[in-house]
């Protein structure tokens, strides 16, 4: 039986991703590491700092030791580093936003990135640019920040957080062919958006890819 490992930086991600595995790939098992300090350290010290890289290595080693066949890093801020460290260790590691970026580039050239954390902007936009370059296409990326939304998430005001994200998504849709949500925590904002422009979130696409199942995102 295939076993998927998850590296989370918030315990709030555990239940949604476990549920996605049950819904999208019921034949898969899952193991989890939650390191809440990892995101704080990455924001404070930088995603490539020795302290952050060491924490990523320890998490990947723990998940590998637990028998994970593939590992999904659900934090956009450190996902790129997790992929790189995984490759160096001979592990199959997927940053949560990679399948989403691949799909966004396939949809259209004007891509709106909605983010609530400044630390996710550079990793997300760089990934989209790399995907576009690998396909030989040009894209125009615009960044839309959800002001003060993250503070609501941190105090547990999830409804307020998701409402803020949905409002910004609808604004971004006015000048975009496709809108992507830069953080996994934003996924449920999809159900609060009313736009005909495709809006993509990362969790379901990443779980489907890692588990070898198929899922069509809500657009």
Image: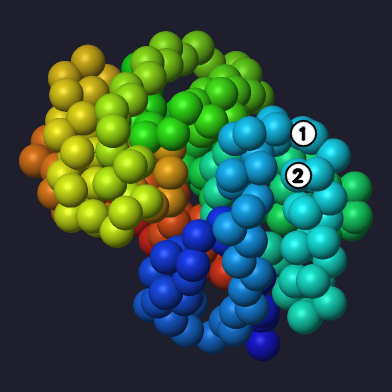
Q: Secondary structure at mark 2?
A: helix
| Residue at image location 44% in from the left, 34% down from the top | 117
Image point (39%, 69%), residue name: 16
Residue 52 has which mark? 2
22 with respect to 34 (left or right): left
Label 2 CA crowd tier, 10 Å (few <14, some 14–19, many 20+): many
Q: Is residue 64 left or right of residue 12?
A: right
Q: Please identify the quarter of the rendering in which residue 9 is found.
A: bottom right
Q: Is residue 64 above or below residue 152?
A: below
Viewer-proximal residue, 33 or 184?
33
Question: Residue 163's image quarter?
Answer: top left
Q: Is residue 124 visible?
A: no
- How far across and down, in percent of the image, does residue 70 sit? 70, 66
Please tell me which residue is depicted at 47% across the width and 84% down the height of the picture: 26
Residue 25 in view in this figure? yes
Marker disc for residue 48: 1
The quadrant where residue 170 appears: top left
Which quarter of the figure is the N terminus placed in? bottom right
């Amino acid at each position: 039986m295939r076993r998927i490992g998850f590296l989370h930086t918030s315990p709030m991600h555990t239940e949604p991703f476990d549920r996605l595995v049950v819904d999208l790939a019921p034949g898969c098992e899952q193991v989890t590491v939650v390191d809440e300090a990892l995101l704080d350290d990455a924001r404070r010290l930088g995603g490539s700092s020795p302290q952050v890289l060491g924490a990523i290595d320890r998490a990947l080693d723990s998940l590998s030791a637990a028998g994970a066949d593939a590992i999904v890093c659900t934090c956009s801020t450190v996902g790129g580093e997790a992929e790189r460290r995984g490759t160096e260790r001979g592990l199959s590691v997927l940053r949560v936003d990679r399948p989403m970026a691949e799909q966004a580039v396939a949809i259209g050239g004007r891509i709106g990135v909605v983010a609530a954390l400044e630390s996710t902007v550079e990793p997300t936009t760089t990934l989209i640019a790399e995907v576009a370059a690998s396909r030989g296409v040009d894209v125009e990326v615009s960044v839309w920040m959800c002001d003060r939304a993250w503070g609501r998430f941190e105090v547990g005001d999830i409804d307020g957080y998701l409402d803020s994200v949905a409002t910004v998504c609808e604004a971004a849709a006015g000048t975009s062919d496709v809108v992507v949500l830069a953080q996994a925590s934003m996924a449920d904002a999809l159900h609060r958006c009313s736009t005909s422009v495709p809006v993509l979130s990362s969790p379901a696409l990443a779980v489907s890819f890692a588990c070898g199942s198929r899922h069509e995102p809500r657009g």
